[in-house]
Amino acid sequence: MSQAKEVRKLFLDFFAKRNHKIVPSSSLIPIDDPSVLLTTAGMQQFKKYFTGEKDALKDFGTQRTCSVQKCFRTTDIEEIGDERHLTFFEMLGNFSFGPVGKDDPSDFNDKSGYFKNSAIYWAYEFLVKELGLKIDYVTIFKGEDKIPYDQTSYQIWKDIGFDDKNIKEFGREDNFWGPTGDEGPCGPTTEIYIDNIEIWNLVFNEYYQDKNKKLIKLKNPGVDTGMGLERLMKVVEKKETIFETSLFLPLKEIIFDQRIDLEIRKYRIIADHLRGAVFLISDGLYPSNLERGYILRRILRRLVLYLKLSRLNLDIIGKLVKVVIENYKDFYPEINNYDKIINVIDKEVRIFEKTLMRSLAKFDKIIKINDAYEEIGEKLFLLFSSYGLPLEIAKEIFKERNWNWDNKIEEVFNKKYREHQKLSKGNG
Ligand code: SER
């Protein structure tokens, strides 16, 4: 953990020296951005500086900021358990807003906005000179949909010393970022790869994408970079995966201490969801059936499921929460609230544990591997309506047992669900 502490500090110091204002992470619950349920990127708290609605010079005394931002992404929730996906992660980022000045990376007195020259050179300098890492290759935007080829970034990487074969070119799918939600700043990117993983994404916010997906040129281009701390620590500490880094090791030790033969995928899901829940709760979220509250409920339910499938006692949660708090409280003082966090988790997981145990017993009685998909759909609806077993958890159980999941199951389930809703509305 001390290594991660050091890396955060090195990053912030590096950019502070270059006249960036260090801004604390904003909450995982976005304060000023209705376009998303949770904070998914470091740039979110700065959106209005990119658009010019707010003035960075006035608010920060400089047109440059940097942060280590708590982020939470749910798009990949079912991928968690592989080597690289996470729900919660930390993102190191530097940002520039407003009119671009000299854009000279060697000028330490300049506080004005900067662009590709400084952003690329500093990223290179930080990784190679400060951290002693070796960049494998970089990618740039090749031009697509009338958005031009990024000749400037190409030239800057060439000048730094990269060969053509180490400057790969991709289109909108890979090298164009944003916006978050349905509108906002966005632009072409250049991305840095180490050990074949994308380490740092440098976004050049030249456009604003409106609700109709139309790109409008921003008055001033901005810089928005993001580097996942977990991935960075993987390469700094030379580990096989992010789940072996010092950010996760204390959790791993506790979990494997209780179950030495645990399947690695289960450990990763437990560690990811537990850590994510601690951060969400410490930012004021409670489990519920609505929007972001449901995200928390969903990961806590999956946590219970995987603890049960791993034959781990739910009491392990308390130990794991303590370790997460210990690891992070210096940097994120808001998580130093064991009693509240454990109360919220405990209440939710105890209730769901009962639901799960009852419905699993019934599941095993009524569902057989060779049942027709339609029949399974009906039975799962029964388990949902009478026992409270959510469909997504049933799906996980199928996956765990290597049973086939067919869309027909979901179709029948949804049809039954709609009928049920109509009936209960009619009765009410
Ligand atoms: N906003 C970009 C990202 O999330 C860079 O910070 O990757």
Image: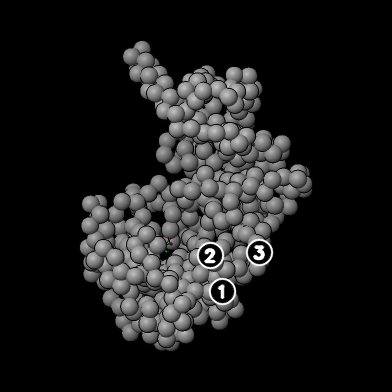
The answer to whether 293 appears left or right of 153 in the picture is right
- Is disc 2's CB within 8 Å of ligand 1? no
Q: Earlier in the sequence, mark 2 or mark 3?
A: 2
Camera-near label (1 vs 2) is 2
Q: Residue 10 has which mark?
A: 1
Whereabouts is ligand 1, in terms of quadrant? Answer: bottom left
Q: Give amino acid for label 2.
A: Ile
Q: Is 112 drawn above or below residue 394 in the view shown? A: below
Residue occupying image coordinates x 54% and y 41%: 299
The percent coordinates of residue 358 (x first, y second) are 62, 22
Mark number for residue 239? 3
In the displayed structure, would residue 219 be above or below residue 404?
below
Relative image position of residue 282 (x, y in whole percent): 54, 48
Residue 401 visible in the current orientation:
yes
Percent across and percent down for residue 418 are 37, 23
Per the image, the residue denoted by label 2 is 197
